[in-house]
């Protein structure tokens, strides 16, 4: 698993109430990445994405657009430690 990387994303803009989390789960499953996505109380969406560098980058690229109704202003990306997370899940708001 040495080719696995993890990134923490914070997505800002109109990203809650527009199917962003569910769409992220669908994209993650399509790309074969693991992790989670959740709403934050400040109106942003946060996601932990882990997998191959190409797959993680593909999800980051998608996150800049998101689903059709989203209006993404910016995506902050930082390195993160990998977690033992099976699949990709939608988590509760923090």
Image: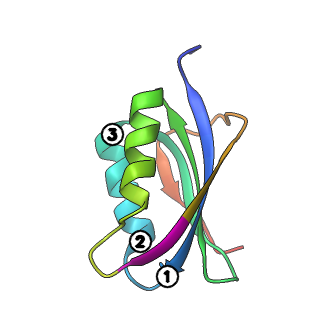
Q: Observer-nearest residue: 47 or 13?
A: 13
Q: Observer-nearest residue: 8 or 92?
A: 8
Asked if labels 1 and 2 touch by Cβ distance under 8 angstroms, the answer is yes
| SS for callout 3 | helix
Is 74 drawn above or below residue 62 in the view shown?
below
Tell me which corner region of the image, top left, top right, bottom left or bottom right, holds residue 66. Answer: bottom left
**Residue 14 appears left or right of 58:** right
- Quarter of the figure with the C terminus: bottom right
| SS for callout 1 | loop
On the image, numbered disc 2 is attached to which residue? Answer: 20
Q: Residues within 10 Å of mark 2 (few under 14, many from 20)?
A: many
| SS for callout 2 | helix
Question: What residue is shown at x 44% (from left), y 86% (from top)?
Answer: 17
Question: What residue is shown at x 50% (from left), y 40% (from top)?
Answer: 34
* Residue 54 within the magenta-colored segment of the rendering: no
Q: How is the image coloured?
A: rainbow
Residue 16 image label: 1
Tell me which corner region of the image, top left, top right, bottom left or bottom right, holds residue 41. Answer: bottom right
Q: Observer-nearest residue: 13 or 49?
A: 13
Is 21 drawn above or below residue 57 in the view shown?
below
Q: Position of residue 87 (x, y in %)?
A: 47, 42
Residue 31 image label: 3
The span picked out in magenta is 70-74
Q: CA distance from mark 3 to mark 1?
A: 22 Å
* Residue 72 within the magenta-colored segment of the rendering: yes
Q: Position of residue 73 (x, y in %)?
A: 50, 75
**Residue 55 appears left or right of 81:** left
- Quarter of the figure with the N terminus: top right
């Amino acid at each position: 698993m040495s080719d696995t990387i993890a990134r923490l994303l914070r997505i800002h803009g109109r990203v809650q109430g527009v199917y962003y989390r569910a769409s992220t789960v669908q994209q993650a499953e399509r790309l074969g990445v693991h992790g989670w996505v959740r709403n934050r109380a400040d109106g942003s969406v946060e996601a932990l994405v882990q997998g191959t560098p190409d797959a993680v980058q593909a999800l980051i690229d998608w996150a800049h657009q998101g689903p059709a109704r989203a209006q993404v202003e910016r995506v902050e990306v930082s390195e993160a430690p990998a977690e033992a997370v099976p699949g990709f899940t939608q988590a509760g708001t923090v």
